[in-house]
Structures are given as C-alpha cells and as structure tokens.
Amino acid sequence: MTINEKQNQIIEEFSVFTEWIDKYEYLIELGKNLTIIDEKNKTEQNLIKGCQSRVWIDAEYVDGKIIYKADSDAIITKGIISLLISVMSERKPEEIINADLFFIEKTGLHENLSPTRANGLLAMVKQMKLYALAFENIQKNKL
Amino acid sequence: MIDAVNIRKDFSILNTTVYGKPLIYLDNAATAQKPECVIQTIDELYRTCNANIHRGVHFLSEQCTEKYEQSREKVRQFINAEKKSEIIFTSGTTGSINMVAASFGERFVSEGDEIIISEMEHHSNIVPWQLLCERKNAVIKVIPFDDKGVLRIDLLDSLITERTKIIALTHASNVLGTVNPIKEIITKAHLHNIPVLVDGAQAVPHGNVDVCDLDCDFYVFSGHKLYAPTGIGILYGKEKLLEQMPPYQGGGDMISTVTFEKTAYAQLPLKFEAGTLNFIDAIALGVAIDYINKTGRQNILNYENKLLDYATKRLASVEGLKIYGEASEKVAIVSFLLKNIHHLDTGMILDKQGIAVRTGTLCTEPLLTHFSKTGLVRASFAFYNTFDEIDALCEALEKISLMFK
C-alpha cells in the first residue's frame, strides 16, 4: 500500500465517527496497541518535549526502509503517533521526505498537530522527516 | 446571595457553544471572563475619551487623566491601602513582581543575602528572584508544604537569618487553592524587620483583601483574573519602601526634570509608571472593581465557597480521582488526576465536551515535583459558575474513567 492509499484508508475509517468522543475512543484503542519503543531507547536524545505530554521516537534503517518506534505518556497522543507510524514506517526515505500528510486535516486531527498544541506531535512529524533525510544522506554517501 | 442565572447575563461569552456543546468555563484561575460593563467601557473610551494622560492640557487628556486617577482611588479603596500614591499600575502580577525584584533588589540585596519563597509559588514568583540572585550572588530559600498542601510555617523560623532581605509568598496557591496564613507570616517577618511581598493573583478575586490589616509591604495582583482586561495589574507598596527604591524603567511621565547631566524623578506613584501606561485598561479595571463591589465581595466569597465544597465532594466521589490540595481554607480551585490517566488526555476529552479546564504544569513545576507528577488537571471557579456545571464536569470525568478501563 502506498503512503496515499494508507492515508485514504485512515480517512475512510474516521469517516464513520460523527462524535469526537468516538474518534478519541478509537485513538485510545490504537494507542494501547502501538508497538512501543524499547525502554532503553527512551533516552533524553530521543525525547521530544512538548509542554504537556512527552513523546519519544527512534528510527532504524533496515533493508533500505525506515522503521519508526515511538511512545508517549499520554494515550491519545500515542494513538495519533500510531497513525503516523502506520503511514510513514517501513518506507523508503524519499517516500517519507516527499509525503504530504493530508490525512491529518481530513480526519480533523489537525488541531492536535497545530503549533499551539503542546503535545509534541508537530515536532514528531518534523523529526520523522529529519530521520528520513539523514538516512538518505548516509545512503548517498555510501554510493 | 448570588443569583448565578442573572449574573450570567452580564457575561455574554458564557452563551458560547464549543463543538456544538454549551461552554462550561472552569479555567477562571487562568483568566476570568469580563462583564458587559467592562467591555463597554473599553469600547466607549476609545470612541469618546482616548487621549494620552498626564501630559495634555486639552479637554480629552484631562478627562482621561481624571478617570485614570479615579481608578487608582478605586483600587486603593478596594485593597484598603492608606495612600493613593502607594498604588502603581503595572502590566500584571508578573510585571509587578519583576519590578520589585529588580528595584528593591537593586537597593537592598547584596552578595550572600537571602530571599525566602515557598514551594507552592507560581513561576512568576520564583524566576524574577532567581534572576536577581544570579545578578547579586544571593540565595533563595524555600518554605516547603506538606502533602495536604499546607505551608510548613513551623519551619519559617529556621529559614530566617540576619541575611534574609525579603519574603515573597503567594496569598493563595493557583494549584492547591491553599490560602496561606499571610498575616501570621508577616507578623513574624516584621519581628526581624523583613519586608514581605504577597502575590495576590489568586486571592484578590475570591475575597476581601486589606493591605493595612495584613500590614504587608508589597501586594501584587492582575486585572485579568479580576474580571478586568488583560495587560493591567497592580503593585501596592508601602510608601517608605517605594521612596527608597530606584525607578524600574526610565522614560516619560516618571521624571520631574531632565537634563543631560542629571534627571530628577517624579513623585510616587508616577516614579514607577514610565512611558504611556495602559490607561484605557486601567480605567476598565476600576469599572470591574465597581462591578465586584456592586455584586458584593462577601456574597461572591460565600457563593464560591459553596461551589468549592460541592465540587470537592462531587469530585472526590468520582472513582479513582485524587484531589491535590486539601487545606482547610481554600479558594475555589480544585486540582486533580484520574487514576492512571494522563492529564492531557483528560483535558482533551473534557474540551470536546465543551468543558474548559487547565492541564499541565500550571506554571508550578517545583510544586508538581513535590507530588512526583508531570501535570495536573485544574478546575477553577468563579461566581458565574453553577452547581449544574460541576455535575456536568463530574459526569464527563466518570465517562472518561470508563473509556480508559
């Protein structure tokens, strides 16, 4: 599935929710099931400090693809992280760098990623792309 | 007696709906809503009376100056200060504390001196003193509080030394709600000739404050938590101290004569009001005070105490909810956590129910460290809140509790 196909799938899933509370219930479920980062990797270096919730993110480069692992102390934040990972993880750096994350706006989750929100999610998206840029550079230097 | 249904008619913002739900505004400790008379005053002043104060000889300037000075008099009466010259308009509590820390500190604090604050202070009553201490190589000492959120004033004697230059304490905690025994502390401090600054940001909106009775040396508060506009606040200081302190900022209005060789400063209070002050909002602060007086400060206090009692009982009955701050005397603030649920999750879901609370560190990281927490949820009440709103909050919290099971 391409990044855009995955995003369309998420938008479809969210389209059944008419109430915010239902969206949050879904995010809480997703948050519970997120493959989390190893405890030992919850380092200061991997921490994105929002004012209110903390987000940790780590990335590995395996067979030309990036695998993200993350965690947060707030579960709704974790649910949104889970969506971001399902869209962005296990893809080539260039796909991630060029990704237009339209699902955020279409699912109504954009307000959770606005710069005024102190949950660290906006910084997380930035960090995911920075990892992709870094791995792409490493790859180029090897060639 | 307060009739909240009628009072709410004065606050049109309370009719707002958010996400299709009626707004339940429980973030009053962050900022209070403004009654119609305050909003109208600002509108009218800009339409009919806007001219810079103190300098002009023309009609509008004199009219505006008169209103500004009348407002100062209203503030004086409101906190029962002895003299009008002891009332200084500032930008707010933070501005007032920074002014004292810088100016009093410049004059009276030297290397090795000590400043006493408490463990429950808002960052704005910590950081200005730290800045001063960095400049002067002075030291901060801290009065702790116990697990109920009561200040350990039994430890005050052991903290006071001959190097103590000032004690800066909150009158009421913005998180725990605790009302501190300020008068007792001031009496004790004065035995050692130590002046006391009282942060009244959370106390002034909730009851009577009498600076003469307290005998405090400085009392500071914000307009915006007192139903007045943002950007205006008060520094009350005893004349004998203010006279000895150097001006905080230089500029227009705070001088009597200026030459390149030597400038003479204006008398109090203008010495501390450099530049064009926020005079429109200062006048509106006076109107907010009129509104509070008309409503009755004792009425407000009685009603808010009932809200607080009801909220405390109702919240305590929500399964897994723990309240932080159980002092016997509190202002209408209740901070809490639902068991194992992150404060941000609670706050985000409440928001979607139309309920506005505050979450996070609440500008009191040292206080949270006491409880080993990264954040709390805070509901804070004003006299326009209702018992139904407290029920709605508790029902929403019960629902959230179930969602996370």
Image (spheres, coloured by chain):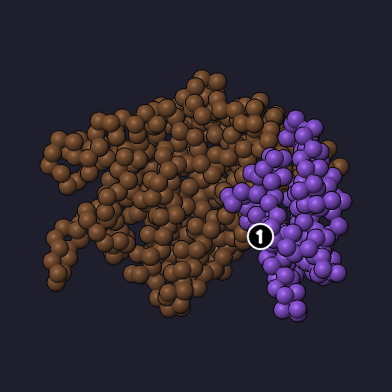
Question: Residue at image x 55%, y 34%?
Answer: B382
A93 lies left or right of A50: right
For disc 1, the marked residue is A126
Which of B195/B364 is in front? Answer: B364
**What is the letter of the brown chain?**
B
Residue B214 at least partly seen? no
| Res B240 quadrant in image | bottom left
Q: Is residue A17 visible?
A: yes
Dot 1 falls on a residue whose secondary structure is: helix
**In the rendered view, does B160 fall on the left or right side of B217?**
right
| Outermost residue, front side | A143
Colour purple belongs to chain = A
Q: Residue at x 43, y 78 (%)?
A: B111
Position of residue B351 measured from the top left corner of the image (x, y, whole percent): 66, 38
Residue B69 drawn at (x, y percent):
25, 41
Check disc 1 and give the amino acid type: Lys
In the image: residue A61, left or right of residue B179: right
Residue at image x 39%, y 72%?
Answer: B109
Mark 1 Cα-neighbour bin, 10 Å: few <14, some 14–19, many ≥20? few
